[in-house]
Amino acid sequence: MKIDKKREKYTKNLVLAGKKAVHEVDVNSRQAVILQHRLLAELLQENKDTEYGKIYDFADIHSVEEYKKRVPFSGYDDYSPYIQRMMEGEENLLSKNAPVHYALTTGSIGVPKYVPVSEKELKKYVKYSLEMAFGVADEYYRNTTGRGCPIGLGLNAIEMKVKETKTGVDQGSISGTLMKSAKSIVPFILSSPWEVICPDKKMDMKYLKIRLALQNKDLAFMDCAFLSGLVDLMDYMRDNYEMLCDDIEKGTINEDVDVPPEVRESLMNTLKPDLARADELRLEFSDGFDSPIVPRIWPRMSWIGGIGTGGFFPYVKRMRKYTGKSIPFNNLCYAASESFMAVARHMSDTSYVLLPDGGFYEFIPVNDGDENHTLNIDELEIGEDYEIVITNLSGFYRYRINDVVRVTGYYNETPILKFIYRKNQLLSIAGEKTNEEYLRWAIENFARESRVSVNDYSIFADTTTNPGHYVFLLEPSEIVPKERIPYCRDILEKFMVHANPTYGDLLRNGSLGPMEIVFLQQQTYQLYRDVMIMKGASANQLKPVRVIDSPFKEHFFFDLKENYD
């Protein structure tokens, strides 16, 4: 009873903080233009005496127009020498505020990048990720039921690994640094203890997170950086529920599972045999997975948090098979290691409200032809696509993150954005310029017409043939008979021609060869994520593999094609 009261207290505190964050989004959106100009002026004044600020004479910049004229666009390589010096302990190089964290990410060629994160930036993550999610959930339930969000533990599948630089600054997952400040309340809001939330050693995280979540019938929410992470956990539960139920009945951690001895001992001290819960779960699992399993085993489940927009759209459908349609999904945010840019203002939103206090933003019109011409937030047109350029709170100025977004509307004075594609993920064998949006549209329509449910997919530009051609690699939810492959190929190519007319023109004049379809074995993409995590990649940064653009990816995926022999 003591734990339940504390759980209620801490959850209510999170909801109150979340309601405040929601209110701030609403208030700031009404004065977004003023806030943008004010924020840029503050950043220039604050950092005028930094080494970077002196180079570009921040002290003498007094307008947005002057800023754009004097300060060039930048990329990570422009900051790398400064960051190396900062990690050695030098200060006042890019920002007056020393980093409190380095977000460790991997570049397109696999070279680690260390992105400095200031205290100001970190507070935005706390407010608009963790807290805002509870505020949005509470608002949803008050609007639909008249009562607040149900209280209960949550299954957290976000990676929280954190190490320190030699100067004592955290590096790794931003989530880890955020969670460290809340270590004392973890047992009262999450189903996993600290050793599993922020592990310092390798262990079987899928088993532990699901094992500990299943024993608690009152689980009320689940969250992950991307929905693919939650789908992986649900798939693991589906494939291993008999073992999990046996372990819950015995109150043990399975001896075949990779868990460090000290962690195993610590967990075993808190676990008790629970035959009643095990039998309850067995009964539900024995009824199969044709009807949604999540509300049957966790009747208090109230919301799911995880990005399911853009390239993650296949995972929404897969997650819905487990949850059904009654549990609302929160797409959380649009963010990068360099900046927390926008939030999902309501449950089920697939576009995001830009945060005018999150950084200063410029937009390069994709169809303008003049990459030096940028627009401010009040100059954008609904329905148009733009490359987003950020000046963040941690010392990056006019930074191009290579994301293309579409303005789908305005929320008061601030634009509502939908992520469309990454510029460096664009394919062009013969000038056709195929982006992720074209691929997504073609796959969605292919799946509907062919009735082939696609778990995930990638594309490979095969230039070894003359002419070059596209190879689509699809992981279906059920094996597709070999004799249906030509039919599937024709349907997919039809929709690719509709999605990208230039592709169709080049196909007809012989500049591109007919596409090819390769069906992959079941769980190929899950295996890829597992392998990348074993190699040290952060689960929070494992985005869908849309383009096969390295020898490693080429060998990995083509080696796992369905064997029809």
Image (tube, rainbow, N blue to C red):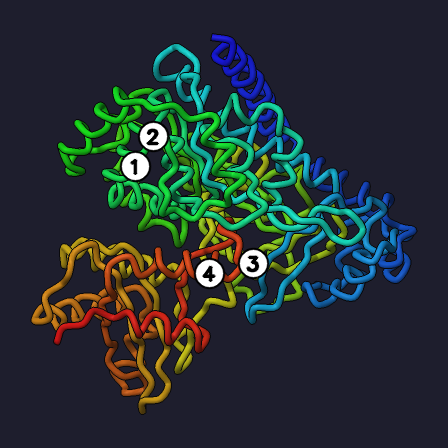
**Residue drawn 63% across the image and 50% down it:** 172
List the residue tagged with mark 3. 387
**Residue drawn 21% across the image and 58% down it:** 476
Q: CA distance from mark 2 to mark 3?
A: 43 Å
Instruction: Indicate the quadrant containing the C terminus: top left, top right, bottom left or bottom right.
Output: bottom left
Percent across and percent down for residue 562 are 20, 69
Q: Which amino acid lies under the numbered mark 2 shown in the image of this protein?
A: Leu
Q: CA distance from mark 3 to mark 4?
A: 29 Å
Sequence-wise, which precedes: disc 4 or disc 1?
1
Sequence-wise, which precedes: disc 1 or disc 3?
1
Percent across and percent down for residue 501 are 31, 70
Q: Is residue 241 above or below residue 442?
A: above
Q: Is residue 143 above or below residue 415?
A: above
Q: Quadrant of residue 107?
A: bottom right
Whether residues under marks 2 and 1 lie with C-beta atoms below 8 angstroms apart, the answer is yes
The circle on residue 214 is: 2
Describe the element under mark 2 as helix, strand or loop.
Answer: helix
Q: CA distance from mark 2 to mark 4?
A: 26 Å
> How packed is label 2: few (under 14 Cα within 10 Å), some, or many (20 or more)?
many
> How packed is label 1: few (under 14 Cα within 10 Å), some, or many (20 or more)?
many
> How packed is label 4: few (under 14 Cα within 10 Å), some, or many (20 or more)?
some
The circle on residue 545 is: none
List the residue tagged with mark 1. 244
List the residue tagged with mark 4. 532
- Nearer to us of marks 2 and 3 is 2
> How packed is label 3: few (under 14 Cα within 10 Å), some, or many (20 or more)?
many
Describe the element under mark 3 as helix, strand or loop.
Answer: strand
